[in-house]
Amino acid sequence: MVLQYLDFQYGPRYFGVANYAESLVALPHSLARHKDIGLGADLAQHIQFVQGDACNLKPQPAQYDLVLAANLIDWLRQPQRFLQDIAPMILSGGLLLLSSPYIWLEEFTPKENWLGGVRENGEALTTLQALQRLLVAEFEPIGAQQDLPFVICETARKYQHTLAQVTLWRKR
């Protein structure tokens, strides 16, 4: 059912670029097998996906091993608040996977709440730099960031080709 929904929303491969949603669903499973993560194939079989409202996080009875925030951070009114609210919900040693093209638009996020995409002391502040500042106290980055291409079919004749930056963080 989920794959049918994702396929309907994002469609098949376009211009040689894999279905973004399918790539993101596959990513945690492949990461779980990655040597830097430290999970074996047996644990990868127990991964469950839970959806929630990032702007209205409810207390959970148990903490999460992995939180995936895909194409989310730059659509929130208060992205910093989301990161602060989600941190206590992740187990020590758990993972936070962020994926976003960082397309900051004032219609979704007031400019004063942008994480990067602005100038600070005359220098460009990237979203990755802002994330590093915000997350350093509770998370450590795992590996280098990766670019993940995706294509959105906007109309029968218009496609949007975008690169999301994927970062992975381990909770201290």
Image (cartoon, grey):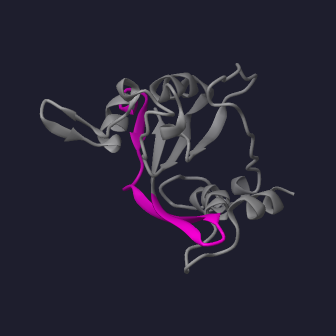
Above or below 4: residue 86: above
Does residue 156 show up magenta in the picture? yes
Dominant SS of magenta comes to strand
Query: Residue 96: where, in percent of width, then height?
Result: 53, 41
In the image, 94 versus 146, the foreground residue is 146
Judge from the rendering whether residue 135 lies leftward or rightward of residue 27; answer left or right.
left
Instruction: Identify the residue at horizontal 71%, vertical 20% (top origin).
Output: 58
Above or below for 42 versus 121: below
**Residue ranking furthest to the top:** 59
Judge whether 81 appears above or below 53 on screen.
Answer: above
Percent of width and height locating residue 29: 65, 59
Question: Which residues lie in the magenta part?
Answer: 135-163
Residue occupying the point 38% across, 32% down: 114
Residue shown at 53%/38% (left/top)? 75
Q: In which quarter of the image is residue 66?
A: top right
The spot of residue 40 in percent (x, y) is 64, 58
Q: Is residue 62 above or below residue 32?
A: above
The reply, left or right, for residue 118 in relation to residue 55 is left
Nearest the eye: 154 or 6: 154
**Residue closest to the eye, 15 or 19:** 15
Residue at 80% across / 57% down in the picture? Answer: 5
